[in-house]
Amino acid sequence: MSAVRQEAPSLRGHRPAVAVDTAAPSSDTPAGSRFHNSLGPRRGSLMQEPVLVLNATYEPINVTAVRRAMVLMLKGVAQAEELHSAEVHSAAHSHRVPSVIRLVAYRHIPQQSRALSRKNILLRDRNTCQFCGRVFPSSELTLDHVVPRSRGGRSTWENLVACCYRCNNSKGDRTPEEAGLKLARRPRPFTLHTSRQLMRLIGHRDERWRKYLFY
């Protein structure tokens, strides 16, 4: 069977460079920036809400979490362009929660900047099985090697696709053609266009993002 039910060793330990960055700040967190708010159970979810990150030229380049976005603002690396009505509080100040931030200095973004990982493959394929076309939760999807590993298939962007367990069992250790299956689309690496599409999907519910993404 050619699926990767858990990430292969060669894919472990990689974090996407341009993705939903939910890493909490550690030792580089500025003094006085330990945030809290008065929203009760919503506190954790609020701090993980997506924030659109723009380059200094207003080009959308990333999606991060509220907590990380506010740390970037406090460090002077970014400034808010759009704000939510909710507030969070540090030891001495209240801060409006950002929806869109912009980097103060221009940052060069490589054309290919996403690490190869299970999460990013599922993001690229939009949690859609590439054989039957159905959308599934991440827990109900696996990765399939289009050309099986037993045939020399490698763990690459061009040879890994999201696949439901039923299609994976049907395909087995065969190529799609041998199994009578057809790929929805040819798998490709992430591009700037792919990242923009994902940003649109993540930010669809926030109208503050639209003028930066929908054009």
Image (spheres, rainbow, N blue to C red):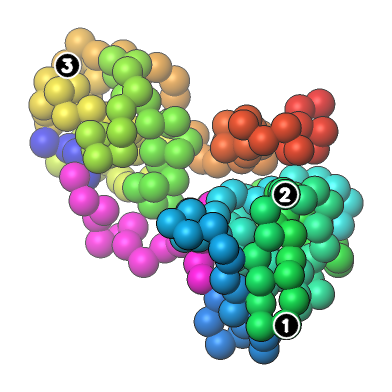
Identify the mark at residue 92; answer none if there is no mark.
1
Position of residue 109 in the picture relative to residue 2 (left or right): right
Residue 192 occupies quadrant: top right
Residue 46 colored in magenta in the image: no
The amino acid on which the numbered mark 1 sits, given as a three-letter code, is Ala
Point out the tag, 3 or 1, that comes first from the N-terminus: 1
Front-most of 19 and 91?
Answer: 91
Front-most of 111 and 27?
Answer: 27
Secondary structure, mark 3, is: helix
The amino acid on which the numbered mark 3 sits, given as a three-letter code, is Ala
| Residue at left offset 50%, top offset 67% | 23
Position of residue 79 in the picture relative to residue 140 (left or right): right
Point out the tag, 1 or 2, that comes first from the N-terminus: 2
Tell me how far mark 3 sits from mark 1, CA to CA.
Answer: 64 Å
Q: Start and end of the magenta stretch?
A: 5-24
Q: Which residue is mark 2?
A: 85
Position of residue 124 in the picture relative to residue 35 (left or right): left
Residue 123 occupies quadrant: top left
Position of residue 71 in the picture relative to residue 105 (left or right): left
| Residue at left offset 17%, top offset 16% | 179
Identify the mark at residue 152; answer none if there is no mark.
none
Q: Which residue is mark 3?
A: 179
